[in-house]
Amino acid sequence: GGCWHQCCPGRNNTCWAPGARRARCYCDSYCERTGDCCEDYRTACRHAAVGCAVGPWGPWSGCSSRCGVGSKARSRQVTIPPWRGGEPCPDLKQRRGCLGEHPTCGMAK
């Protein structure tokens, strides 16, 4: 057994191999926190791991409300996806509040 055949990012309970004394050992990057990595995890996975890389944030969208409280959003793209247990990607979308102030907002109907 061992991790030579698979390495998984994050927490993945299906990413395991038979270990010593019939116990399961894991090949996901979470095993470093739980201490149940296979003996060859570092050699097979960490040295070959590639962490996620993302591009710059795009521009904020316009406010979703012409008058009053609304929200704006922006996003960024993954440039290099995580591989073989590398660091997972950070948030790709952000949202924040805004106040729509279109010139017609103060006009009574």
Image (tube, helix red, strand yellow):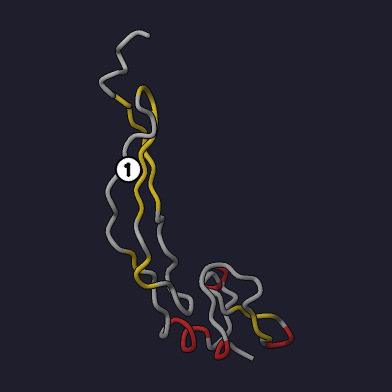
For this view, does 91 lie left or right of residue 13? left
| Number of residue marks | 1
In depth, the one of 36 and 59 nearer the eye is 59
Q: In the picture, residue 104 is in which quadrant?
A: top left
Rendered location of residue 15, percent (x, y): 62, 77
Q: Position of residue 92 (x, y in %)?
A: 40, 56
Q: Is residue 58 above or below residue 37?
A: above
Badge 1: few (under 14), some or many (20 or more) residues near its Cα, within 10 Å? few
> In the picture, residue 62 is in which quadrant?
top left
Q: Amino acid at mark 1?
A: Ser
Residue under label 1, please give it: 61
Quadrant that contains the C terminus: top left
| Relative vertical location of residue 102 with respect to residue 50 in this rendering, above or below | above
Residue located farthest toward the front when viewing the structure as drawn: 109
The image shows residue 83, relative to residue 92, as above or below, that is: below
Label 1 SS:
loop
Q: Nearer the viewer, residue 11 or 74?
A: 74
Q: Position of residue 106 (x, y in %)?
A: 30, 13
Q: Is 20 situated left or right of 98 in this image?
A: right
**In front here: 61 or 57?**
61
The N terminus lies in which quarter of the figure?
bottom right
For this orientation, the residue located farthest to the right is: 22
Which quadrant of the figure has residue 98? top left
**Residue farthest to the top, as pictured:** 108
Residue positioned 57% across, 69% down in the render: 34
User: Which residue appears at 65% of the width and 84% of the height?
Assistant: 17
**Residue at (28% x, 24% y) in the render:** 102
Q: Position of residue 78 (x, y in %)?
A: 37, 66
